[in-house]
Amino acid sequence: MSDFTPQPPVKTTKTSIMAIISLVTGILGFIQVLPAIGPLAAVITGHIAKNEIKKSNGMVTGNGMATTGLILGYIMVAVGLCVTCIFVLTFAGLITLPFALPWDSYTYSY
């Protein structure tokens, strides 16, 4: 007989693919390569990755990447909403501007 004692299996971890996707789409949305779909994809995949990491009991890593993707995604969603509101208010103001002027504004009485 030999004195061979088997070693316990090594606990290996893997990085969440959803966390990587969240980070990449968040960066691409932030630098305006994917201006519309990037932030939404970053937010959705970031939440999926956080849930996957939480349920894995330490077997899946990538929490920092998922958090960074979420932050970039939410920042760009907020910026997009602000730009949309400014555009809509400006456009509405341009449409209503002729009706806001008095009808006889083209005549001058000195």
Image (tube, helix red, strand yellow):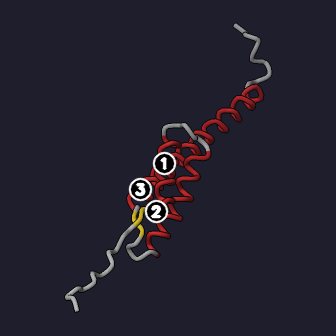
| Number of residue marks | 3
Residue 49 x, y percent position in the rendering: 49, 64
Secondary structure of residue under mark 2: loop
Q: Earlier in the sequence, mark 3 or mark 1?
A: 1
| Badge 3 vs badge 1, beta-carbon distance below 8 Å | no
Q: Which disc, if any, is residue 24?
A: 1
Q: Alpha-carbon neighbours of circle 2 within 10 Å: few (<14), some, or many (≥20)? A: many
In the picture, which quadrant includes the C terminus? top right
Q: Amino acid at mark 2?
A: Ser
Q: Alpha-carbon neighbours of circle 1 within 10 Å: few (<14), some, or many (≥20)? A: some
Residue at mark 1 to residue at mark 2: CA–CA distance:
13 Å
Is residue 25 depicted above or below 7 in this figure?
above
In the picture, which quadrant includes the N terminus? bottom left
Q: Amino acid at mark 3?
A: Met
Residue 28 x, y percent position in the rendering: 51, 42
At horizontal 58% and vertical 39% (from top left) the residue drawn is 83
User: In the rendered image, which residue does mark 2 sit on?
Assistant: 16
**Which residue ends up furthest to the left in the rendered image?**
3
Q: Quadrant of residue 62?
A: bottom left
Q: Which one is nearer the viewer's eye here, 68 or 24?
A: 24
Residue at mark 2 to residue at mark 3: CA–CA distance:
9 Å
Q: Which one is nearer the viewer's eye here, 39 or 53?
A: 53
Q: Alpha-carbon neighbours of circle 3 within 10 Å: few (<14), some, or many (≥20)? A: many
User: In the rendered image, which residue does mark 3 sit on?
Assistant: 65
Residue at mark 3 to residue at mark 1: CA–CA distance:
9 Å
At horizontal 79% and vertical 18% (from top left) the residue drawn is 104
Q: Amino acid at mark 1?
A: Val
Q: Nearer the viewer, mark 2 or mark 3?
A: 2
Residue 89 x, y percent position in the rendering: 65, 37
At horizontal 46% and vertical 53% (from top left) the residue drawn is 69
At horizontal 45% and vertical 58% (from top left) the residue drawn is 66
Q: Quadrant of residue 54?
A: bottom left
